[in-house]
Amino acid sequence: MTQPDTRPHPLKWLDLPPVWLALCLVLAWAQARYVPAGLGFGGAVADLLGGLLVGGGILLMVLAFAEFRRHKTTVVPHLTPQRLIQTGIFSRTRNPIYLGDALVLAGLILRWDAVLALPLVPIFVWIIERRHIIPEENRMRRTFRAEFARYERNVRRWV
């Protein structure tokens, strides 16, 4: 008797947060480039705020990846981590990488003056919650039980 194949379906690798982020970024860029509609956020202030959001988002991601590496566990959303990370940036938010993604998206929308693309930010957050965060948290509940329940009570999902 053979063991069942537990690897994720190959197309599952297309359903990753960076792919969703890239799709939203392409849509925002295309809106700014081809359908500007004469709208803008306001020049230098929007550029500064956009740059701060992008920089903050990248910083959150770097801090999170450092914790994953330090704890020697997977960063892949479709896999169950070997350890529940509760240190570093994970003591402030349960989803620093996804939060970073949303900040990068918002920041680039500001920098590109993609006013009509602003709804992509809540849409992106909704997609990530439904397709990644909720399934990940369910896997962690099953794997880490009481430890995850305590973590969930003490640390918010986003901020």
Image (spheres, rainbow, N blue to C red):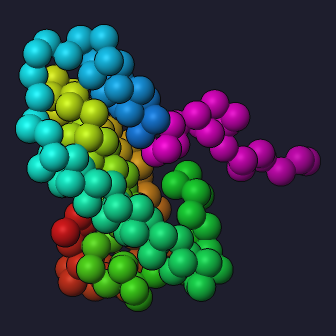
Where is residue 5 drawn, in percent x and y?
77, 45
- Relative to residue 148, is residue 68 drawn left or right? right
Q: Is residue 158 magenta?
A: no
Q: Please determine whether, in this image, residue 42 is positioned above or below residue 115.
A: below
Q: Residue 114 location in percent, x, y?
A: 22, 28
How many numbered marks, from 0 up? 0
Residue 156 quadrant: bottom left
- Magenta range is 1-20
Residue 3 lies in magenta, yes or no?
A: yes
* 98 is higher (above) or lower (below) than 105: below
Q: Residue at x 12, y 50 (%)?
A: 45
Residue 18 seen in render: yes
Query: Residue visible at 21% across and 40% down?
Result: 110
Q: Nearer the viewer, residue 107 or 78?
A: 107
Quadrant for residue 68, please give it: bottom right
Residue farthest along the right direction in this orientation:
1
In the image, residue 44 above or below residue 98: above
**Residue at screen point 14% across, 39% down:** 43
Depth check: give the residue in front, 131 or 112.
112
Q: List x then y, in percent, for residue 52.
A: 26, 60
Quarter of the figure with the C terminus = bottom left
Question: Residue 18: horizontal and vertical position, in percent?
Answer: 49, 44
Quarter holding residue 142: bottom left
Res 137 visible: no
Q: Is residue 139 above or below residue 37?
A: below
| Camera-side residue of 23 and 33 | 33
Q: Residue at x 54, y 78 (%)?
A: 66
